[in-house]
Image (cartoon, rainbow, N blue to C red):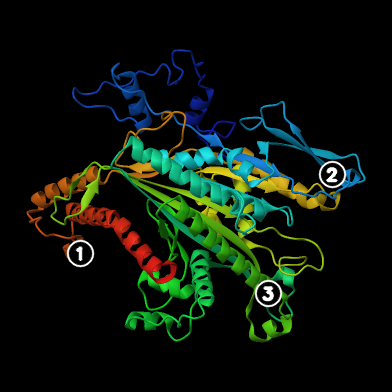
Amino acid sequence: VARRVPPDENDDDTGRTPAASLLKTTRRQPRTQASTPSTAFRTPPPTARGIEPRTTESARARRAATTRSPGDSPPRVSHSEPAVVAVHTGEEPDLKLADACLAVEESTTDVGGGGGVRVTLNRPRTTLKKTYELSTVVSNSNECFDKTGFAAATRAAVLDGVSCALITTGIHGSGKSRLVRGHGADGGADHLGACGYVASVVFDAVDEVKASHPGDVVTVAVSAIADVITAPVAPGVPVARRKTHEVLVDALAAGIELASAHRDDDDADEAPRKSTGEEDDNVRGGRGGGAGAVSAVFHGATSSVGVNVREHPTRGFYAEGCVEIVAEDAEDCARLVALASDGFRAKEREVRESGRATSALAASNGSFAGERVHCLLALRITRRSARGRLDPAGCGVWLPETETTSEIVVADVASIDRKKGSSAGGGGAAEDAAVKAFGRCVDALADSRSHVPCRDSKFTRLVSKALSGIARLFAVVCVSRNASRHDESDAALQLARKIRRGVRATGGKQRGDAGGGPSVSGPSTRPRPDHRVAYAAECERLDEEARDLAERLGVSIAGLTSGAVALDMESGDDLLALRDALAEGERLRAEVGRGAERAERSRRVRERFLS
């Protein structure tokens, strides 16, 4: 126990020194209004003439807005659009009224930016009910495309460069895939579903662009990816506890190879097609046809190229290694969409057959059993202005004034059948990694969290533009009126409500185009274009910056490339800035030439498989 030290003789009876006692007994003066340290009454210190006090960017922007002359254009107003969420109840003509648990009626309230319909879900054998406010209700492919507003968004993707995405999800057996991809048989206006209408409307908008802006070049490239969810089979591990993986498969390449094989089978009198060169022999490799042959011909490689998700510094996530064919007209685009649908169905049949395989053989070799397939069809629209100039660097490259890139994505999210005794994707199946990641992203958006985990799966990366607000999102949730599927319909409708509440489209960022370019309805009524680059202005600015830096460093700029600039620990900031300016200019000039490269690859595939 510490011994108490007696107070010093200089201390007073309270244990404080005389100085401390004096400070303690000093009465504090009350604070008056004039001495209150408030920023409203604080006078800024005087500044020297010609020196501007330090302010934030927002303060400078407000000051510039107040000093704008009357003739200047008004500032761009930030705009956001809520996601459009529709409900599809499926076709169940044999359902009795007593077995129905869902009712749809027109909504009289304005919830989530537009009112719409009210979906009432009754729990069986109880009086409990839930109501969901959604945008609209659709019953067929035409309504899915037109009534939701996706048709207008498709036109805007070509005219304004604003990307859009249509995502369908729901329960098993509700007609979801038929709504989006059609029934597959030839004949009928909706044999390709909503995807067929997209192909038609896109080229109608392309004709409008060519009529209003003669000389502008618009290209439409079609690609299709099947996201196969697989689960490794291991002995002693229950199916529901398996860890699922995502494997991306090129569905368009598979559909093209199927069409080529059927055409060869129909012409039985003709001899089998032989290789015309050493490159063709290397592509086939003695193993026959396959989607890998189409991929190898497209990429000019000796073997197939795998599909992976990569991230571009300005364009975002994209699928690397997929076959992307340039469509010539509306009929050719519909043909490519039909080939992609055939590739999707072929992969789904393969997954169902693998799901029926015996688990003993799979467990013995540790193979992967397919669970389900998510289908993504993408149309990339590139609009290049006719105005521009030749590259002053002497490369002979035409630098357009502006180039706008947008994307139309139609995603068919595979449903999960929770019935007992079903095969692939049935009861007790492993959890879908893509669906789980998509649900986490929607939850984060509905709760207004600062972080949206779009990188958790390959599927969410490919649709990240719609989840992050760069692209407009249109969602169709398919449910059932049957009371036996109440829980599944309830989960789907809860997801729909979160999508409508949380996802909003604001538009993308442009580089080298401060004004954002013209728009059909004005900048304050539409989101900004997805990706727009002013190649001519950007390359001119980078060349001027490189010349100034080279002159400052005493280096000749003639024939200088970024690879020739050697950096070490003693290199200054000017040398680093010179290397960066040269590298950025080289990257932009390389991007300009990729349109011709894509057209050449498409020509090779057409001559080999589609002629």
Circle 3: residue type: Glu
The residue carrying mark 3 is 353
Q: Residues within 10 Å of mark 1 (few under 14, many from 20)?
A: few
244 to the left or right of 510: right
Image spot of residue 342 (x, y percent):
57, 64
468 to the left or right of 363: left
Quick check: marks 2 and 1 in contact, CB under 8 Å?
A: no
Image spot of residue 343 (x, y percent):
56, 66
The residue carrying mark 2 is 101
- Quarter of the image holding residue 515? top left
- Quarter of the image holding residue 317? bottom left
Q: Earlier in the sequence, mark 1 or mark 3?
A: 3
The residue carrying mark 1 is 563
Going by the picture, which residue comes out furthest to the front?
Answer: 269
- Quarter of the image holding residue 181? bottom right
Q: CA distance from mark 2 to mark 1?
A: 68 Å
Q: Residue at x 44, y 13 (%)?
A: 34
Position of the C terminus by quadrant: bottom left
Circle 2: residue type: Cys
Q: CA distance from mark 1 to mark 3?
A: 52 Å
Q: Secondary structure at mark 1?
A: helix
Q: Residue at x 31, y 61 (%)?
A: 597
Q: Residues within 10 Å of mark 2 (few under 14, many from 20)?
A: many
Image spot of residue 186 (x, y percent):
60, 58
Position of the N terminus by quadrant: bottom right
- Can residue 162 be seen here? The reply is no
Q: Secondary structure at mark 2?
A: loop
Q: CA distance from mark 2 to mark 3?
A: 34 Å
> Closer to us: mark 1 or mark 3?
3
> Closer to us: mark 2 or mark 1?
2
